[in-house]
């Protein structure tokens, strides 16, 4: 009994850890999109749960740990809202030097997601987006990170993409490309060009800024 | 020739010359803008330190959807590079992504020089040597570097 209680405490500690964990950053300089690092993940948790408790507690933890799935849900069509209130959430999930406090809490539950997105006014969303590195091109050039969004495949900047009648598209994993390049890339490889997450054409959506 | 060159290649070429990567020089061929003459400096604290390695890099028609073709021209003693200079590197094959660029590829190749991987060999004899007697293999690599990659 006391053993069981201790292991439960251990589990909730684990949960806290996970809450504080930043999203995985998969971008590297030399390997570009190379490394496929995952956060401590889904598989770990249920395994621990099985060892320590037999019934209901397990479910609870599984839900908490499927963080990534929840994020993915946000971007699916039935969640897409006309005012794009979910977009900032997504951006928050990525580490931002000036807003470290917005970090991963967002990923934990739907409630928190809503709170975070309400807290973000429009202009801030824009700022966040501007600072978002457009991909390996920035990390590779190193010295002068571009201030505008650009497609990491054709290297065209946002303005150029617009005037040529292309839309900016985001993947469910949060990486932004021009429509043409992303669709072409997905035809060749069914993976995100930036992080190699498996993707289909249904897992991308236009992004308006 | 230049007229049919995709803008991405032009941009990459310009950036390579305006913001060069330390230890890497990539210059397009005068006749063929898809063919690059590359010099990579051997990373410090590797058996290739002090050497300058020549490579050729070619951007195929479907680049960036397909990876560039890269080959060492300078002889090098490395478990993942065979005697024809062909390189065993995942991003040049199945792990290629169109978001990678000439510069990231060359950086990866430079990193490969720092981290030989004898468990995924291309040059089997070299890999074997690397596993059986690493210090001897490193000495050979240094000797080859002096012999082939240093202009006196």
Image (spheres, rainbow, N blue to C red):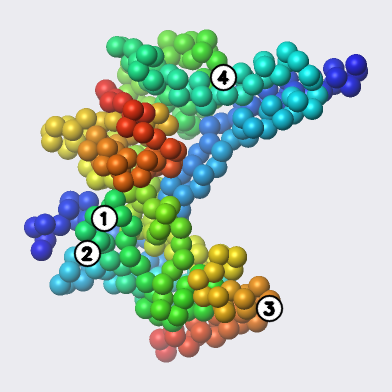
Above or below, B121 relative to A99: below
Are the residues flagged by discs 2 and 4 in contact, CB closer than 8 Å? Answer: no
Vertical placement of residue A39 versus A119, above or below: below
Badge 4 vs badge 3, beta-carbon distance below 8 Å: no
Dot 3 surroundings within 10 Å: few (below 14), some, or many (20 or more)? few
C-alpha gap between disc 2 and disc 3: 40 Å
Whether residue B101 is visible: yes
Output the chain of dot 4.
A
Q: Nearer the viewer, residue A77 or B106?
A: A77
**Image-quadrant location for residue B27:** bottom left
> On the image, which quarter does residue A191 sit in?
top left
Specify few, some or many for label 4: CA neighbours under 10 Å numbering under 14, 14-19, or 20 or more: many
Determine which residue is flagged by label 3: B133
Structural distance between the alpha carbons of marks 1 and 3 = 40 Å
The reply to the same-chain question for discs 2 and 1 is: yes
Q: Which residue is mark 4?
A: A108
Q: The disc numbered 3 marks a residue on which chain?
A: B
Q: Helix or strand or loop: what does disc 2 sit on? A: loop
- Which disc number belongs to residue B34? 2
Which of pointers 2 and 1 lies earlier in the amino acid sequence? 2
Residue at x-position 54% and y-position 86%: B143
């Amino acid at each position: 009994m006391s053993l069981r209680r201790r292991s439960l405490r251990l589990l909730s500690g684990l949960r806290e850890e996970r809450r504080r964990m930043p999203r995985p950053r998969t971008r590297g300089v030399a390997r570009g999109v190379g490394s496929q690092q995952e956060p401590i993940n889904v598989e770990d948790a249920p395994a621990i749960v099985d060892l320590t408790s037999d019934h209901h507690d397990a479910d609870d933890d599984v839900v908490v740990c499927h963080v990534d799935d929840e994020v993915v849900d946000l971007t699916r069509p039935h969640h897409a809202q006309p005012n794009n209130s979910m977009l900032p959430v997504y951006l928050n999930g990525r580490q931002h030097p000036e807003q470290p406090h917005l970090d991963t809490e967002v990923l934990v539950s739907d409630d928190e997601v809503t709170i975070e997105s309400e807290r973000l006014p429009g202009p801030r969303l824009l700022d966040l987006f501007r600072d978002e590195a457009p991909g390996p091109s920035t990390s590779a050039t190193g010295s002068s990170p571009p201030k505008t969004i650009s497609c990491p495949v054709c290297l065209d900047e946002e303005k150029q993409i617009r005037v040529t009648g292309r839309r900016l598209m985001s993947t469910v994993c949060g990486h932004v490309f021009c429509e043409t390049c992303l669709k072409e890339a997905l035809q060749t490889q069914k993976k995100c060009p930036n992080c190699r997450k498996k993707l289909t054409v249904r897992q991308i959506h236009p992004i308006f800024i | 020739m230049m007229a049919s060159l995709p803008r991405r290649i032009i941009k990459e070429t310009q950036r390579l010359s305006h913001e060069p990567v330390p230890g890497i020089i990539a210059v397009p061929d005068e006749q063929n803008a898809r063919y690059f003459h590359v010099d990579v400096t051997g990373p410090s604290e590797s058996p290739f330190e002090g050497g300058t390695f020549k490579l050729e890099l070619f951007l195929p028609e479907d680049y960036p959807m397909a990876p560039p073709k890269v080959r060492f021209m300078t002889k090098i003693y490395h478990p993942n590079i065979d005697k024809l200079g062909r390189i065993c590197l995942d991003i040049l094959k199945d792990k290629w992504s169109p978001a990678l660029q000439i510069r990231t590829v060359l950086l990866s190749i430079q990193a490969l020089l720092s981290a030989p991987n004898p468990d995924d060999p291309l040059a089997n004899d070299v890999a074997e040597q690397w596993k059986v007697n690493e210090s001897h293999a490193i000495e050979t690599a240094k000797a080859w570097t002096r012999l082939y990659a240093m202009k006196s």
